[in-house]
Amino acid sequence: MPGIPREVIEHRLKISSDAKPVRQKPRRQSVERQDFIRQEVRKLLDAGFIEEVHHPEWLANPVVVPKANGKLRMCIDYTSLNKACPPDPYPLPRIDQIVDSTSGCELLSFLDVYSGFHQIRMNEEDKRHTAFVTVDGLYCYVVMPYGLRNALPTFLRGMNFTFRDLIRNIVEVYVDDIVVKTREGSTLLEDLTLVFDEPRTTRTKLNPEKCVFGVSGGKPLGFPVSHRGIEANPTKIVAIEAMRPPRPHQGPAKAHRVLGSP
């Protein structure tokens, strides 16, 4: 995957000048997890996301964590490196404002950026500092990995630059989730044409399996919305309907506490 050109954006670590490099000692891993890490490393090498590195100053460990679907994910423990990098104050979009902005739209489309962080390259001088250790050797990221302290602000800068002419008009962006707002159904194709022209200019890849076009509602950022605006979450309604009424000696106070009302 070629990725976004460096002229558009790249990730720099900006390590504090007084920070002392930390080389984490290799951690014990079960044979099963070693095999899983080996498989993941091979995939990353084949994709061109990582490369071998020699004599790195910073060194981290891979960590295997379970996903919600029961499968495993390999992450890198960048705790030491992150402590040495001052936080980037770049602002996150407000979810409530994004959701509210969809009110009155006849149709919505939801786009997903494919392997978002990995589309942004690491700065050439900084990439060796992302090094991690496995039983088979040392590797560093050529692209921006997940887990770095300021990776999210860098990615948001890239997305805001890509869709800069459409944001707060027909597009809203929150990390790798993109909402296309169509006020009238007759302009859907026109809106989508405008939106698709933008990623082409920065070579940003979308994930077709997670894109949905021209629907009356959906769950952007986990909130159910329609042309009327934000909708009540059906699962929350079921939970409220299933609540037992308060007993006589409890009065309304218990219900207020459960519902979070004053």
Image (tube, rainbow, N blue to C red):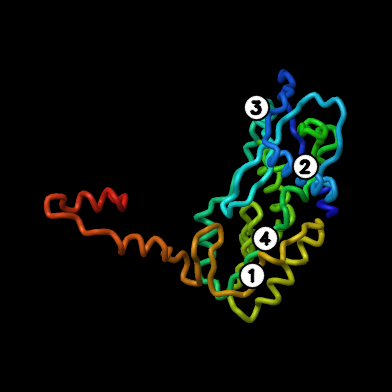
Element assignment for label 1? strand
Residue 161 percent coordinates (x, y)? 73, 52
Residue under the point 70% across and 56% down: 164
Spatial distance from mark 2 to mark 4, Cα to Cα?
28 Å
What residue does disc 1 label?
Answer: 212
Spatial distance from mark 1 to mark 2, Cα to Cα?
35 Å
Spatial distance from mark 1 to mark 3, Cα to Cα?
39 Å
State yes or no: discs 1 and 2 in contact (Cβ < 8 Å).
no
State yes or no: discs 1 and 3 in contact (Cβ < 8 Å).
no
What residue does disc 3 label?
Answer: 83
What residue does disc 4 label?
Answer: 112
Image-based side of 70 in relation to 238, left or right: right
Q: Which of marks 1 and 2 is nearer the N terminus?
A: 2
Relative height, residue 82 to residue 186 (above, below): above
State yes or no: discs 4 and 3 in contact (Cβ < 8 Å).
no
Residue under the point 22% across and 50% down: 254
Q: Which of marks 4 and 1 is nearer the N terminus?
A: 4
Q: Which of marks 2 and 3 is nearer the N terminus?
A: 2
Q: Residue 38, which numbered label?
A: 2
Element assignment for label 3? helix
How many C-alpha atoms fall within 10 Å of the one at disc 4: few (<14), some, or many (≥20)?
A: some
Spatial distance from mark 4 to mark 3, Cα to Cα?
30 Å
The image quadrant where one finds the N terminus is bottom right
Amino acid carrying label 3: it is: Lys
